[in-house]
């Protein structure tokens, strides 16, 4: 569940004068999730968000099964990519994926609850590197993902003086 909804984060037009890095990450996540119909439609929730990190969960449903009866890799990739997106956009600078790769280590099964934990490895200038691990409810590693990000023009909400 998104832990930021009830923490008094003000609307887009009423941001506090002194925003902490944690408040900034939570506000960015809330605003992004409102527009992210893909992640919401797949049942993803944000369990944790902080500057440069994010943890999302997704249940594996019958509709996600491939011809082998296990979770289609595209859904696992989507979960990892969403965690990557929330982590690299936590600084109030619009950031997009430049390159991603994933290695599948074990199948996700129908009925599993998958958790993707993203962490920042490096962020220099406009480029970032983020690693994401996807685990099932038994803490088995299902996949590892590496995302390369690129910051582009724009902010998720108006903020004077940038977001660094």
Image (spheres, grey):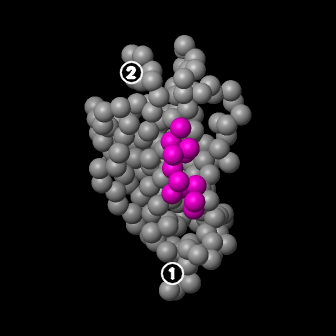
Q: Main secondary structure of the magenta part?
A: helix
- Is residue 148 magenta-colored? no
The residue segment tinted magenta is 31-42
Q: Residue furthest top?
A: 17
Q: Residue furthest right?
A: 6
Labels in figure, total:
2
Alpha carbon separation for disc pair 1 and 2 = 44 Å
Query: In the drawing, what numbered circle is on residue 138?
Result: none
Left or right of 8? Residue 21 is left
SS for dot 1 = loop
Left or right of 134? Residue 100 is left
The residue depicted at 47 percent of the width and 42 percent of the height is 87
Instruction: Identify residue for label 1.
Output: 66
Query: In the drawing, what numbered circle is on residue 162?
Result: 2
Residue 116 seen in render = no
User: For mark 2, does the 10 Å Cα neighbourhood hold few (<14), some (14 to 19), or many (20 or more) residues?
Assistant: few
Q: Is residue 1 above or below residue 108?
A: above
- Is residue 39 magenta-colored? yes
Image spot of residue 53 (x, y percent): 50, 41
Residue 34 seen in render = yes
The residue depicted at 34 percent of the width and 57 percent of the height is 100
Q: Residue furthest bottom?
A: 67
Image spot of residue 141 (x, y percent): 54, 64
The residue depicted at 58 percent of the width and 55 percent of the height is 40
Q: Is residue 134 above or below residue 6?
A: below
Dividing the picture into quarters, in which one does residue 93 lie? top left
The residue depicted at 47 percent of the width and 57 percent of the height is 80
Comes first in the chain, label 1 or label 2:
1
User: Which quarter of the figure is the C terminus placed in?
Assistant: top left
SS for dot 2 = loop
Q: Residue furthest front?
A: 13
């Amino acid at each position: 569940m998104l832990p930021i909804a009830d923490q008094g984060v003000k609307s887009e037009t009423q941001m506090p004068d002194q925003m902490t890095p944690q408040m900034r990450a939570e506000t960015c996540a809330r605003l992004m999730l409102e527009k992210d119909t893909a992640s919401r439609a797949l049942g993803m929730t944000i369990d944790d968000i902080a500057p440069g990190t994010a943890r999302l969960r997704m249940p594996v449903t019958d509709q996600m099964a491939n011809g082998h009866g296990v979770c289609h890799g595209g859904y696992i990739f989507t979960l990892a990519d969403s965690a990557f997106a929330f982590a690299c956009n936590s600084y109030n600078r619009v950031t997009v994926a430049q390159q991603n790769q994933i290695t599948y280590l074990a199948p996700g099964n129908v009925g599993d609850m998958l958790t993707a934990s993203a962490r920042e490895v490096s962020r220099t200038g406009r480029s970032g590197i983020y690693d994401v691990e996807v685990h099932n409810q038994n803490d088995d590693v299902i996949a590892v993902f590496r995302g390369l990000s690129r910051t582009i023009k724009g902010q998720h909400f108006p903020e004077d003086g940038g977001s660094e």
